[in-house]
Image (cartoon, coloured by chain):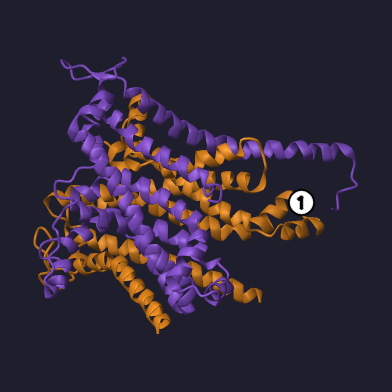
């Protein structure tokens, strides 16, 4: 380097300098994240132990486990938690099921212009409004909607607004979060691995199962963190396309103004699910690569 | 034969997936031209009515203005803060780096409804009233993470040789940063800002918990949906979509032109 032979004081200043610069870069932004995110989550956790005064209906600081006991013992609440977990897992599974073949097609089979077109098509929905999309899904599956119209010749009728439609809606909403990392990972797989696989006698599905999937597992896990946690926290899809379906989010939203401590206790369930999921994902080492 | 089949199977599969992706968007656009009754659920005929009077439903354009205020403010601040973190993570190896990474990642992995509820309990505790300020503080927080991830990828892909070359040509740190590093990272920062704006503009759950009596555009759609969403909401949805599409397209064209210039 040009300044390599310069005198000592400058170089020692430069040695110390990066550290100051690092602190300068990180101090304020991290304060924002910690100050807003960590502090608010902590306050929520504390609120979960408070109670609502039955006479004044004001929130009172204190320590009670009643909110948590309710969450785990009232059958309706328990079944809502299980239903939500099931929906989140089903959405994640469907997203993987759609994303892997599509990613494979885009990355390895499609011509360049088709590939670019599809890449844009995948990201497009991210730019259309979230609520607008949910309402559009409602229109698609409504009684006189597209689905029943298109399926009528086959004698198939949609199931009406219920859990399966919620799953389809959420799959639609979060699909880009899965498709993009999978597609990116797929493009990095060298072509000759496919040739090698077929030279060794593997058919299409065998190649996907034994060659492609193991290589894109980190991308799938990264995407699944989003599809899983976004589904756990959603309640509008259930509201618009679920009929009477309730999710944990519905309970939190319904209680946040009437009984904040109960809402806080409910919030701990999706947090627990996500933490468990992240711990499992972390063991595979794919979070480091995001 | 089986090869032909498997190849076309995947094509059919891709076609279905794409149809699934595009159908609701097509619906949204189509119904902005609907000669709608109050509920805008059934197709009743083609009209430009909603496009000619976009502000006709009470409160719709006001809520749109609020969304722009929140969106632009949070985009600017989050992009700035997120880029700072991205450079710190991309350029320095320090103790606590993986903790910082985790702290960036967590807000993205936290279910929105939990974020909304916890932020509300914080704003109540520190006496920041629910409203646009609270919403903006919240949006900045979750946008930072997405900015960091987007910009960090770009910083990491930089060729360190370019900066070394600049220093060899006697550029000082600041000049190197301004003339070499920043222009190279700029597309990443642009993409991050676009993403931040989209996330902020589109957010409903966190916003609804913390906005009090003020309405943003998604909240307007929500309130309206209880009676029936007017086609004007589809007009605005379509417009935002077209603008975003144009920006993404413009970004790609500019990027390609730069590549062409280089070679």
Q: Position of residue B55 (x, y in %)?
A: 21, 57
The structure residue drawn at horizontal position 37% and vertical position 45%, both measured from the top left corner, is A229
Q: Quadrant of residue B17?
A: bottom left
Say if A54 sits above or below A287 in the image: above
Residue A94's spot in the image, x, y percent?
33, 58
In the picture of the structure, the residue carrying the numbered disc 1 is B172
The quarter holding residue A99 reads bottom left
The hue of chain B in the figure is: orange
Q: Position of residue A77 (x, y in %)?
A: 21, 34
Indicate left or right for B51 with A123 as reference: left
Determine whether the residue tagged by mark 1 lies in a helix, strand or loop: loop
Q: Is residue B176 left or right of residue A53?
A: right
User: Which of the 4 image quadrants contains residue B155?
Assistant: bottom right
Q: Closest to the observer: A275 or B163? A: A275
For chain A, what colour was chosen? Answer: purple
Q: Residue at x 55, y 77 (%)?
A: A199
Residue B41 position (above or below residue B123): below
User: Which is nearer the eye, A52 or A22?
Assistant: A52
In which quadrant is the C terminus of chain B drawn? bottom right
* In the rendered image, the vertical position of residue B150 relative to residue A152, given as above or below: above
Q: Quick check: can you spot residue B63?
A: no
* Nearer to us in this view, B247 or B91: B91
The 10 Å Cα crowd at callout 1, few under 14, some 14 to 19, many 20 or more, is: few
Q: Looking at the picture, how far across and down is residue A29, in whole percent?
A: 53, 38
């Amino acid at each position: 380097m040009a300044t390599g032979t310069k005198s000592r004081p400058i170089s020692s200043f430069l040695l110390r300098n990066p550290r100051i610069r690092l602190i300068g870069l990180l101090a304020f932004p991290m304060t924002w994240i910690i100050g807003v995110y960590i502090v608010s989550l902590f306050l929520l956790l504390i609120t979960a132990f408070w109670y609502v005064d039955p006479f004044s209906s004001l929130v009172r600081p204190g320590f009670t486990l009643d909110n948590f006991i309710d969450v785990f013992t009232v059958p309706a609440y328990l079944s809502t938690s299980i239903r939500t977990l099931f929906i989140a897992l089903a959405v994640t599974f469907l997203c993987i099921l759609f994303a892997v073949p599509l990613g494979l097609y885009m990355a390895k089979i499609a011509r360049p212009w088709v590939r670019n077109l599809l890449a844009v098509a995948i990201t497009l929905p991210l730019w259309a409004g979230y609520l607008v999309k949910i309402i559009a899904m409602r229109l698609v599956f409504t009684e006189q909607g597209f689905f029943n119209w298109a399926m009528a010749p086959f004698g198939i009728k949609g199931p009406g607004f219920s859990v399966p439609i919620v799953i389809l809606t959420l799959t639609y909403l979060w699909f880009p979060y899965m498709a993009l990392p999978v597609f990116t990972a797929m493009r990095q797989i060298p072509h000759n691995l496919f040739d090698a696989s077929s030279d060794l006698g593997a058919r299409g599905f065998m190649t996907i199962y034994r060659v492609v999937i193991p290589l894109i597992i980190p991308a799938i896990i990264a995407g699944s963190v989003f599809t899983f946690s976004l589904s756990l926290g959603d309640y509008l899809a259930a509201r618009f396309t679920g009929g009477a379906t309730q999710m944990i989010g519905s309970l939190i939203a319904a209680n946040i103004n009437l009984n904040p401590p109960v809402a806080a206790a409910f919030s701990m369930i999706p947090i627990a699910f996500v933490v468990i999921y992240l711990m499992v994902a972390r063991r595979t080492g794919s979070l480091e690569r995001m | 034969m089986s090869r032909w089949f498997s190849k076309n199977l995947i094509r059919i599969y891709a076609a279905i997936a794409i149809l699934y992706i595009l159908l609701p968007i097509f619906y949204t656009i189509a119904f902005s031209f609907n000669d709608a009754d109050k509920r805008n659920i059934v197709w009743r005929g083609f009209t430009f009515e909603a496009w000619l009077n976009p502000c006709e439903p009470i409160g719709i354009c006001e809520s749109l203005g609020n969304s722009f205020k929140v969106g632009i403010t949070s985009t600017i601040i989050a992009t700035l803060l997120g880029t700072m973190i991205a450079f710190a993570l991309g350029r320095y190896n320090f103790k606590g780096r993986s903790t910082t990474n985790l702290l960036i990642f967590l807000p993205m992995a936290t279910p929105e409804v939990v974020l909304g509820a916890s932020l509300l309990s914080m704003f109540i505790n520190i006496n920041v009233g629910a409203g646009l300020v609270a919403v903006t503080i919240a949006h900045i927080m979750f946008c930072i993470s997405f900015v960091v991830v987007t910009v960090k990828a770009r910083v990491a892909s930089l060729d360190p040789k370019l900066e070394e070359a600049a220093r060899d040509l006697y550029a000082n740190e600041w000049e190197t940063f301004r003339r070499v590093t920043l222009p190279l990272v700029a597309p990443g920062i642009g993409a991050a800002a676009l993403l931040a704006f989209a996330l902020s503009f589109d957010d409903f759950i966190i916003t609804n918990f913390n906005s009090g009596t003020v309405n943003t555009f998604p909240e307007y759609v929500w309130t309206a949906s209880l009676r029936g969403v007017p086609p004007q909401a589809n007009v605005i949805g379509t417009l935002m979509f077209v603008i975003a599409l144009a920006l993404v397209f413009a970004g790609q064209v500019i990027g390609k032109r730069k590549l062409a210039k280089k070679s």
